[in-house]
Image: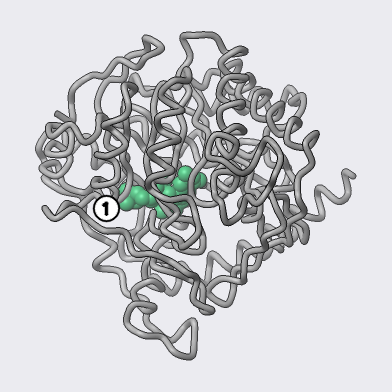
Amino acid sequence: MINEKLELPCGVEVKNRFLKSAMTEGLADSDAVANKKHNNLYKKWAYGGVGISVTGNVQIDHRYIERAGNVVIEGEQSNESLAALADWSHAGTQNNTHLWMQLSHAGRQTPFSINKESAAPSVQPLPTLGGILKFGVPKELTHSEILDIVDRFVNAAEIAKQTGFTGVQLHSAHGYLLSEFLSPNVNQRSDQWGGSIENRSRLLLTVIEAIRDKVGNNYPISVKLNSSDFQKGGFTHEESIEVAKILNTSSLDLLEISGGTYENFTALEIDSLNLKKAKTIKPQRSTKVREAYFLKYAEAIKSVLSIPLAVTGGFRSSEGMNDALQSGACDIIGLGRPLCSEPEIINDLISGAKKSATLYENILEFGPWIFGLNSPISMMRSNNKAAQVYWCYRQILKMADGKEVDPKLGLFRAFLDHFRDDAANSKKYKNHWNDLS
Ligand SMILES: Cc1cc2nc3c(=O)[nH]c(=O)nc-3n(C[C@H](O)[C@H](O)[C@H](O)COP(=O)(O)O)c2cc1C
C-alpha cells in the first residue's frame, strides 16, 4: 500500500511508497549555484508528504547542461556553493523526507544556445525538434574524457553526501549521456565502451561502483533507466531487461523506470516532436488498461530484479497506485507533473482526502497552429503535452518564489514566458562561463 514503509538494500528506511521524480527546476542563476528558491520549493514538496524527493538534474559539467538554470557541481566547490547545497538539503529533508540528488550529463541533448558543440559516445547529431529545439553538434568522447566523466560523477556524489543529501540518482534515461551510451543508435563505438550490451552499460556500471567506493555501503544510490527508447534502432525493452540484470548484481538500491528520449518523449506521452518524423515506436500498454504507461515493461524488469523498483509516468489515482504495488509490478510510485499543480497531493492520497490527482494533462489545451504547417491530431496532442512541460516549469517557479501554484495559468502564456526567459538565461549563462574561461 502507498503508505507502507520500505527498507532499501543499503539499510535506509523510506517512510512511504512515493518518489517525487526528478524535475528540472531552472532556478539557479548563471553561476549554476543553488539558492533560496531551491529551499522554498523542496521544503514545500517535503511537507507534501513524499518519501523520496529526487532533485532536478544537477549537472557534472558546466559545458554540457540540460538548460540554463541547472545547478552544476564540478571540481572543488566554493564555500558559498557548499553552504547553499547544505541549506537546500536541510529544507528538502524536513518531515522525514529523503532528498536525493539526480546527477546528469546532457550529452548530445545539450542545447545549441548553451554550447554549439556537445559531447556523445559517437558523432550522431540530434535533429532540430518541434522546429525550435536545436542542439549542439556532438564530438566523440575519447577514452580519457570518459574516465574524466566517471570522476566528475563521483566528485558530485561525494559533495551531495557531504552537504546532507540523503542519496543520489544517476540519470541514465531520456537520451542524456548515460543513456546515450546504452543506445546502439547513438553509441557506435568499437572500443570497450560500445558494441555489446555489456560494453554499452560499462560506463553506467563503472560510475555506480566508483560512487559506492566513496560513499560507503549505507548510502542510497539509484538509477533512472529507460524501459525502452521506443525508437527504431534504439535501446530496446529486451536490452533494458539485460541492463536491469546487470544492475541487479551491482550495489544499487533502487531502479526507477521511465522511457523515451527527446526524439520520442514517451516519458510524458509525447509521441514525437521531430517534424522530419523520427523513427519512433508507440509503447504498448498492458491489455488490462492501467494509468501508468510503463507498467507492462516494468513487470518484465521486476521479474529479474531483487532490488526495489520504482515506476514513473502516468500514475494519478490511489487505486491505480495500490493496484500496481499489490500486484508486485513495482515497489515505489514515481510522480512528476501532479506535484507541479498539486504539491499536497501525496498527503491527500494517503489520507484518502482525494482519490486521484487532477488530470491537468487532459484539461490544458494549446492548439495545433503554433508549430505551423501540417499538424495532424497526434501532433496537436503532442504539442499540448510538450507545452504542459513549460506550464509545469512556471508552476515550479511560483512555488520557488514562495507563492501558490496557479491552475488557471494558460498554456500559451506559459509557453511564451518560458521561451522568453530561457533565451535570456541561456545568453547570460554563456556569457558568465565565457568570461571565466
Ligand atoms: C517539468 C518537468 C521536468 C522534468 N525534469 C526531469 C529531470 O530533470 N530529470 C528526469 O529524470 N526527468 C525529468 N522529467 C520527467 C519526470 O521525472 C517524469 O519521468 C515524467 O514527468 C513522467 O511522470 P508523471 O506522469 O508523473 O509526470 C521532467 C518532467 C517534467 C514535467
Q: Is residue 358 visible?
A: yes
Residue beneath the point at 36% across and 37% down: 20
Q: Quadrant of residue 242?
A: top left
Relative to residue 356, is residue 84 drawn left or right? right
Task: Please provide percent x and percent y for residue 75.
Answer: 76, 28
Residue indicated by mark 1? 293
- The extreme bottom residue here reads 373
Residue beneath the point at 37% across and 66% down: 385
> Who is closer to the viewer here, 161 or 295?
295
Q: Residues within 10 Å of mark 1 (few under 14, many from 20)?
A: many
Relative to residue 312, is residue 233 drawn left or right? right
Residue beneath the point at 68% across and 32% down: 73
Q: Is residue 401 visible?
A: no
> Who is closer to the viewer here, 286 or 377?
286
Task: Please provide percent x and percent y for residue 160.
Answer: 58, 23
Total labels: the figure holds 1
Task: Please provide percent x and percent y for residue 262.
Answer: 51, 60
Residue beneath the point at 26% across and 58% down: 284
